[in-house]
Amino acid sequence: MKKLLKNLFLEKTLTKQEAKNFIINLSKGKINQTQAIVITSIYNMRNPTLEEIIGFRQAIMDLCVRVNLTEFNAIDIVGTGGDEKNTFNISTLACFIVAGTGEKVIKHGSFSSSSVTGSSNLLKKLGYHFTNKEDNLKNQLDKVGICYLHAPIFHPSLNIMSYARKELGIKTIFNTLGPLLNPGNPKNQLLGVNNLELARIYYYMYQNTKKNYAIIHSLDGYDEITLTSDIKCYTPKGERFYSIEELSNIGYKIKINPKELKGGKNTEENIKIFTNVLSGKGTLAQNEVVLINATFALSLLNKDNFKTNYNKAKYSLISGKAKSILKKFLSI
């Protein structure tokens, strides 16, 4: 371990096997918490390499609680976090809107570490009970259209880091890895990334998978489509640039001020924003940002154009279907 730490401090990178061994040794208690924090925090000073990401991911997925949900043509909408923008829970709202159109969503998330309110904080406070039972999750997908995979009960190998990450309060390598660790292995993924270099690394990795994906990076640093700037988008078809004008023309023609996307100061305030949006009481900016992310997600699930999918997403929201999905989800 001392040699590994020394090499990292000398700005050397890990091989795929070294990255795998780090996670394996962490799960076995062979690495203390201080060493683990130091190693993971190093990636705040540089992006991980493709080899490192692959090694970390392989080890974590080998150790996870497995569920087989591949019979569903589902999507996950998720961001890396760590963009320090303190937005409201855009991705989670988009998931319920997509489910409200009749599509299937396998959402993977956790408690907050570098943000105010993670998706797990929000859903737990609303009364959702986390489960890793395959039959329960399939039942949720069948009857509601969405299930939620709470990372800590699927990835016990990382529990040693949970408290430390919260105490640290800044992003770590696990922000980078989180979107890659969905145990349900959905066939489709809308993935937001907070920096362009990392988006390209993800793109190189996803090219060697069978997943249908769109990797999004807003050029002003958001890990979501925010209608505050142009975006880069990477899909199996290649790299694409979308200007703010193109994006805003999909729905209500609007360019958003970043201040309009701010989340609350605590989980209670973020729950209020979340429920207001689903209840038709969101601001124009909040609604449009959620709808544009849902639109891109729907376009991965079907062959309709953006405008058609925007209208589907908007109907899901304004008709109350998305809110109805949330009610069913919390009661099942």
Image (cartoon, grey):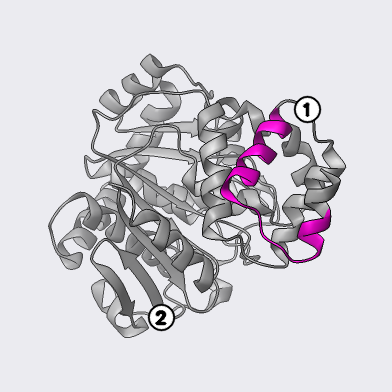
In the picture, measured across the screen, residue 301 lies left or right of residue 291, that is left
Q: Position of residue 81 (x, y in %)?
A: 58, 57
The residue lying at 37 percent from left, 54 percent from top is 206
Secondary element at image label 2: loop
Residue 73, above or below 116:
above
Prevailing secondary structure of the magenta residues: helix
Q: Residues within 10 Å of mark 1 (few under 14, many from 20)?
A: few
96 drawn magenta: no
Tell me the amino acid under the disc marked 1. Answer: Gly
Residue 227, above or below 329:
below
Q: Which residue is mark 2?
A: 230
Quadrant housing the N terminus: top right
Q: Are marks 1 and 2 in contact (CB under 8 Å)?
A: no
In the picture, measured across the screen, residue 25 lies left or right of residue 54, that is right
Tell me the amino acid under the disc marked 2. Answer: Asp
Quarter location, residue 320:
top left
Numbered label attached to residue 164: none
Q: Which residue is mark 1?
A: 29
Q: Across the whole image, how many numbered discs are drawn on residues?
A: 2
The residues bearing labels 1 and 2 have C-alpha atoms spaced at a distance of 44 Å
The residue lying at 80 percent from left, 42 percent from top is 164
Residue placed most toward the observer, 133 or 261:
133
Q: Which residues are magenta?
A: 6-27
Quarter location, residue 21:
top right
Secondary element at image label 1: loop
